[in-house]
Amino acid sequence: MANQTETILTSLHDWIDAGRLNPGDEIDEASLVQHFGVSRTPVREALMQIEATGLVKRLPRKGAVVFKPTLEEFFAILEIHAQLEGQAAGLAARRISANGRAALQAVTEACDEHAARLGGAEPDAYYQLNLRFHATVGEAASNPFLLDLIKTNARKLMAYYRARYRYAGVIAESARDHRVIADLILNGDADAAELAMRRHVQLDQLTAMDLLAALA
Amino acid sequence: MANQTETILTSLHDWIDAGRLNPGDEIDEASLVQHFGVSRTPVREALMQIEATGLVKRLPRKGAVVFKPTLEEFFAILEIHAQLEGQAAGLAARRISANGRAALQAVTEACDEHAARLGGAEPDAYYQLNLRFHATVGEAASNPFLLDLIKTNARKLMAYYRARYRYAGVIAESARDHRVIADLILNGDADAAELAMRRHVQLDQLTAMDLLAALA
DNA sequence: GCGCCACCTTGTGTATACATAAAGCAGGCT
DNA sequence: AGCCTGCTTTATGTATACACAAGGTGGCGC
């Protein structure tokens, strides 16, 4: 955290991850300047960097807004995201380490447990578990570039995934999926793991439309 | 070219694409300032943006250098790149338009022609054809985000791919691959097209080592 | 003569000031 | 009264100045 630009950048990322910053939200340069007590320069630099990753869009004279995909864009990103997560699962099935196995078991267990004990309650807590599950798989793939790509992509869809867990039965279904995927990875069945993860990430059309409506 | 930052950014991209800027090359802030006749601010902003995409790395007090992957990084990126290009080919097989078909036919033809008439000569010219082939497939996939991701990724490997065409027989092999892939796409065989493209992009280990050695 | 310390130079991050372009508002003209 | 035009305000891009940190070099001391 030597330089302020990075501090601001990671803060913005955190805010997006935490749902404090949602698609369509305006990010005001001036208020960031105030909040961090710095000048415009580092704020601008952070915004440009985050814009370069596609998480933020800067409109001509409207300031920066958190990227809010249109319907087409949403599906386009989802299509890629499913592929990348699928690849990660496939690679994880080949490469997962002993530590990775333990971690995957633990997080899958935690998802099951949440679904069993709390049902559809506390969707935000489950969402955190879900993040951990996907991160664990991503790390097991042993490809830092892939992990990075997945994270960036996930941030573009994050708000929509989060909203999803408010719907009835979704948590139980998610936990079941996770169990299946984890078992395939732990058994080293790369192709099946890839396919299962792809299907898990790729929402059906109805669900996707629900989410877009919820965030409209 | 409203703002200078973008001008500089696209120039840097062009230089990388054209091989004028190669992995490991130092990019001096001061010389860019001189070259474009602007102040440090837009130069810095351009460098930060390009750094955010991973094409440039900024070392503490050494200025910026064009990203030069280690062996591990090289394979990690290649692994992703093959998957993305594969996905693009698969999607193209489903979605290619009439115009896209014509373009794909034309560029595949041009590759064949080059291989038939010039053999292994003029590798740089063939390299341009190769770029056009992959761009045509990428566009046919109708997913602008995927296209963007592929382009960014390709830039990280570009210098190595370019070097590849200096080797004997590689151009002919590449043209043959292109023909096979194009036919699969035009026939709408998505799965086969995806697989063929993935194999086409994913270099065998020996070739990869050759290229890394060539650029060392 | 060799080694250590200090100063200077250079590079990099940050702040601030300035200029330009666009948008909104008001006033005048038709 | 409505529309057009001009002015003002604000935002955004760009330049410049300043401060701090690090590394190199030169001089001085041991």
Image (cartoon, coloured by chain):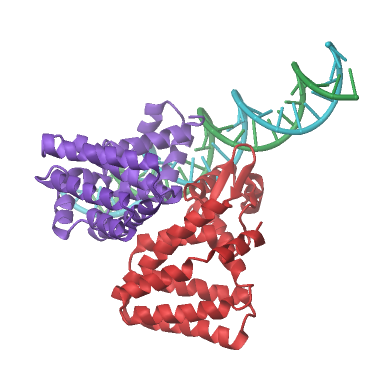
Chain colours: A red, B purple, C cyan, D green
Name of the residue lying farthest toward the left: B168
Residue B3 visible in the picture: yes
Image quarter of residue C29: top right
- Tally of numbered tags: 0
In this view, A74 is above or below A200: above
Residue B50 is left or right of residue D28, and the answer is right
Q: In percent of the image, x 34 and y 42: which residue is there? A: B101
Q: Residue A180 location, x and y as percent?
A: 42, 81
Q: Quadrant of residue A192?
A: bottom left
For the point 47% across and 47% down, which residue is it? Answer: A52
Residue D26, quarter of the rendered image: top left
B197 in relation to B49, above or below: below
Q: Considering depth in this image, is B76 or C18 the residue closer to the camera?
A: B76
Q: Can residue B59 be seen in this snapshot?
A: no
Of residues A13 and A57, the one nearer the viewer is A57
Left or right, A181 with respect to B123, comes to right
Q: Position of residue B77 (x, y in %)?
A: 30, 57
The answer to whether A206 is drawn above or below residue C14 in the figure is below
Residue B162: image x %, image y %?
21, 43
> Which residue is located at x 36 percent, y 39 percent?
B13
**Image position, residue A135 (x, y; %):** 44, 70
